[in-house]
Amino acid sequence: MKILAIDSSGMPASVAVCEDGTLLAEYTLNFKRTHSQTLVPMLDEVRNMLELDLESIDAIAAAGGPGSFTGLRIGSAAAKGIGLALDKPLIHVPTLEGLAYHFYGSPCLVVPMIDARNKQVFAGIYTFGQIQPEKDTEPEDPLRVICDQTAIGVAQLCTRLNELAQESGKTVLLLGDGAHVYRDLLEEQLTMPHWYAPAHLSQQKAGSVAVRAADLARQGKLETAAQHRPDYLRVSQAERVRAQRLGQ
């Protein structure tokens, strides 16, 4: 299966192509330029370098949130546009599951977190299990979701992680920009063994989105371009301000 993957859920913009378990290309740019400026040229560059016929793509994977509201809308629009034009299915990959796949097979409690401002993060807690023999009629998902992605206060997350780490005896592995922004607070409140992912494994990348998408596709989790919607998890700040004004 050949998958074109897009991740513009955070500061990095990333495009990748993966075919039958082989990552053919990945282009990631982590710079202060808008995704509307970078994403389409990156897609075009990858297509040209691979001499890729877009008709040969089987599905388009998109990091579907949470993350930057604007970034998610741009990535979603790009994925939907390609899917509609080529009549190809989309694979919605939760952003934090894509991040967790940087550490596929890790025995740790893998905790990707994205800064949501005001000492809050979008976070999920995952671990990886053993893949069952192929005799199973339903392919088992190697990713075990302990706590699904949600908006949560950093202090509340630390309390939960301390409990889970003590119960399971597992080390906590932290990654994502939230782990960097709130590192001092994490150090104050985490009492169990933990460590931080290095820079090259701590940011969103389309290659991991593509690999996660392949697992989801095997489970039949496909959607049409018209069905695809980003998961924001909470309303934007502008919408919250507007609601407050209307309430007043």
Image: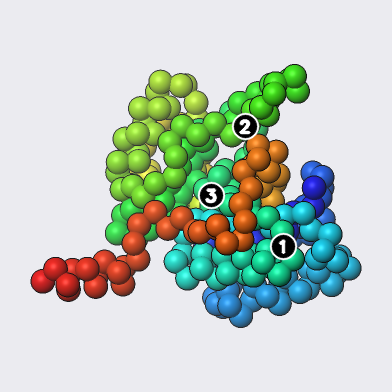
Q: Quadrant of residue 16?
A: bottom right
Locate residue 113 relative to residue 238 in the image: left or right: right
Residue drawn 68% across and 29% down?
139
In the picture, the disc for residue 138 is: none
> Against 168, is 80 above or below?
below
Say how the picture is coloured: rainbow
Mark 1 → mark 2, Cα distance in angstroms: 27 Å
Q: Residues within 10 Å of mark 3 (few under 14, many from 20)?
A: many
Mark 2 → mark 3, Cα distance in angstroms: 14 Å
Q: Quadrant of residue 7?
A: bottom right
Percent of width and height locating residue 166: 40, 23
Mark 2 in CB contact with mark 3 (< 8 angstroms): no
Q: Quadrant of residue 148?
A: top left
To which residue does mark 2 refer? 141
Give the amino acid type for the residue marked by disc 2 in the picture: Asp
To which residue does mark 3 refer? 94
> Against 147, is 7 above or below?
below
Secondary element under disc 3, as helix, strand or loop, is loop
Residue 200 showing in the rendered view:
no
Locate residue 229 relative to residue 136 in the image: left or right: left
Secondary element under disc 1, as helix, strand or loop, is loop
Residue drawn 47% across and 70% down?
70
Percent of width and height locating residue 221: 62, 43
